[in-house]
DNA sequence: GACCAGATTGTCT
DNA sequence: GACAATCTGGTCA
């Protein structure tokens, strides 16, 4: 089943951890693209210097201040879009960055979107999975409940759930220069699609 | 209006 | 392992 507003209303740390093992589904005209979430990072509000919401609301990050369950897409380094799940109540400014997924269905389409045959290099990074799932900025500010992009609970596709039992590793976030002493990164232990460095 | 840093990736050595 | 590619918001003049 689709994760509901009650789920997204929890703290970013809790949502980040609970999102591991769930299914990110994008229904496109070309077909259904499905990936299992294996790595996330939580970004908090005014108490987290690495978060976009740290310095308050701007035109760019306003979606981050919407009610939990909305989609916040961030254009980074002039190249890549990064996909975030907004959490908590409205105007809080917390979100979870989806860093990596494991391809489950629509793999041919992902390979086509990425111009990449190697499955192990398809979705093992935040910019990569956005490209593989053909996620665009048109989803900015929409919600995971009503848009073509949805998240299903881990028990939604038992036939596809290869990692039924897994251990969660909690560690520090990567790729940032501030606030990197906080243990806000979560990933599934020994999963080959977790981004490394 | 100029300058800089940034939640990254692909390519080359 | 180093580095370039390329855009956006923030800061300061």
Image (cartoon, coloured by chain):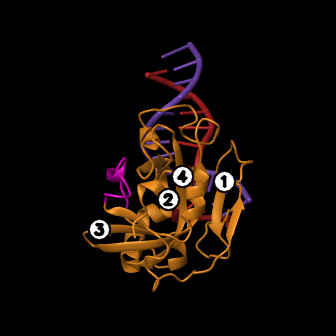
Chain colours: A orange, B red, C purple
Closer to the chain start, of discs 1 and 3, is: 3
Question: Label 4 vs label 1: CA separation?
Answer: 15 Å
Within 10 Å of the Cα at label 3, are there few (<14), some (14-19), or many (20+) other Cα atoms?
Answer: few
Residue A151 or A133: which is nearer the viewer? Answer: A151
- Pointers 1 and 3 within a single chain: yes
Q: Could you say which disc has been placed on residue A127 in the image?
A: 2
Instruction: Point out the stretch of residues depicted in magenta.
Output: A135-147
Q: Are marks 2 and 4 on the same chain?
A: yes
Front disc: 2 or 3: 3
Question: Along the horizontal axis of the image, is A56 left or right of A136?
Answer: right
Q: Is residue A47 magenta?
A: no
| Of the image marks 4 and 1, the number of the one nearer the N terminus | 4
Could you say where residue A119 lies in the image, as x and y percent from the top left? 50, 78
Q: Residues within 10 Å of mark 4 (few under 14, many from 20)?
A: some
Quarter of the image holding residue A120?
A: bottom right
Task: Identify the mark nearer the N-term, 2 or 1.
Answer: 2
Q: Which residue is outermost to the front?
A: A6
Please give the residue where the numbered disc 1 appears in the rendered image: A184
Reading the image, the residue beneath label 4 is: A10
Kindly identify which residue carries mark 3: A28
Q: In what element is the residue under mark 1?
A: loop
Residue at position x 38%, y 80% in the image? A108
Q: Is residue A83 visible?
A: no
- Callout 4: residue from which chain? A
Alpha carbon distance from label 2 to label 1: 19 Å
The quadrant the C terminus of chain A occupies is bottom right
Label 2 and label 1 in one chain: yes
């Amino acid at each position: 089943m689709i994760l509901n507003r009650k789920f997204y209303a929890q703290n970013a740390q809790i949502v980040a951890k609970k999102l591991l093992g769930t299914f990110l589904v994008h229904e496109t005209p070309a077909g259904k693209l499905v990936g299992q979430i294996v790595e996330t990072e939580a970004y908090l509000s005014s108490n987290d210097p690495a978060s976009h919401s740290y310095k308050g609301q701007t035109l760019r990050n306003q979606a981050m201040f919407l009610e939990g369950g909305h989609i916040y897409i961030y254009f980074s380094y002039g190249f890549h879009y990064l996909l975030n799940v907004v959490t908590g109540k409205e105007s809080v400014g917390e979100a979870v960055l989806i860093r990596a997924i494991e391809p489950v269905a629509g793999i041919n389409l992902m390979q086509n979107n990425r111009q990449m045959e190697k499955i192990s290099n398809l979705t093992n990074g935040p910019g990569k999975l956005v490209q593989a799932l053909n996620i665009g900025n048109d989803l900015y500010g929409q919600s995971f409940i009503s848009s073509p992009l949805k998240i299903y609970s881990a028990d939604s596709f038992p036939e596809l759930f290869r990692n039924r039992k897994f251990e969660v590793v909690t560690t520090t976030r990567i790729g940032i220069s501030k606030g990197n002493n906080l243990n806000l990164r979560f990933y599934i232990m020994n999963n080959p699609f977790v981004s490394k460095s």
